[in-house]
Structure formats: structure tokens, C-alpha cells
Image (cartoon, helix red, strand yellow):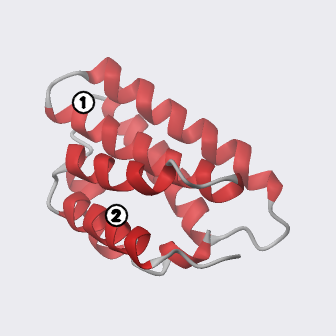
Amino acid sequence: MAAFDTLALASLRRGLEHFRARDYFAAHDDWEEVWRDLNGHRRIFWQAMIHLVVGAYHFTNGNLRGCQGQWHKALQKCEDLIPKYAEPVPKSLTCLRDMVREGLAMVEGGSDPLPHLDAFATSVVSEDWFTLI
């Protein structure tokens, strides 16, 4: 799979920094810059990541329906993408799917998913994700 160019990598890195700082809207903007020019599996994966941060943005604004809607879209993208890979499925994809499932369960159960999302952003998501998918 072709590597990201320098500008795309810079946008992905900024997006990760914004994600970790809970600046979800800025993360969305950064990743969307890259997503527009992608195709195939990468496009679907990064669209799911964008749905994740947009859902978190909605949650921070008290829009639970918006959060759930975005996270359901992210989950569907992951579930549609997983069968397209031969074993092993990229760990980044299964981790994203699991995070979205857990986040949805928390929101639906009345819990705050943001501490869990923070842990995901800082200890699971890494720059390695930029090359895995």
C-alpha cells in the first residue's frame, strides 16, 4: 500500500494531537483533509475515524442522538471493512470497532464514554495507524 505524502502525514498527526486534546471538531477537519483524497480500504477506515470524533463532538455538546448516529455509522464501516481483509485483520481496525461498540454501550447505558475514548486516543491510537490501513 502506498505511503501517505508529507502533507497528508502532517494532517493525520495534527488530527491525532487534536483527538488526544479532546478537540474533536479540529481532528475531524484534519482527517477529512486526508480522507477526501483516499480510496478503497483506507477511505472507509478514515471515514470511520472521522465518525468517531464527530460523535464525540456531539457527545460533548449534549447531542446524544447525534453521537449515537455517528458511532453507529463508524461501527457499520468497520463491520463492512473487516471481511474484506484476509487474516490477520489489521489490529487498528478491530481496535476501532471495539472502541465504537464500547462507546455506544456506555452512551446507551447513561455513562460518559469520554474517559474511555481518552484512553483509546492516548494508549491505542498511534502513528503506526497511518501505515497499517
The residue closer to the viewer here, 119 or 67, is: 67
In x, y percent, where is residue 46?
51, 53
Mark 2: few, some, or many residues within 10 Å (few <14, many ≥20)?
A: some
Element at label 2: helix
Residue at the spot x=32%, y=32% of the render?
107
Nearer to the camera, 4 or 114: 4
Neighbourhood count class around disc 1 (C-alpha, 10 Å): few under 14, some 14–19, many 20 upward = some
Say which residue appears at 68% left-offset and 44% top-offset.
79
Q: Position of residue 56 (x, y in %)?
A: 27, 40
| Residue appearing at x 28%, y 55% in the figure | 116
**Which residue, given by chain and number where applicable, does mark 2 sit on?**
120
Q: Tell me the quarter of the image containing the N terminus.
A: bottom right
- Amino acid type shown at disc 1: His
Q: Position of residue 41 (x, y in %)?
A: 69, 56
Relative to 77, say whether 120 is above or below: below
Give the secondary structure at mark 1: helix
* Numbered mark located on residue 58 in the image: 1
Toward which corner of the image does residue 88 lie, by quadrant? bottom right
For residue 107, the mark is: none
Would you say the residues marked 1 and 2 are in contact, meaning their CB atoms lie under 8 Å apart? no
Tell me which amino acid carries mark 2. Answer: Phe
Q: Position of residue 52 (x, y in %)?
A: 39, 44
Eyeballing the image, is 77 above or below 93? Answer: above
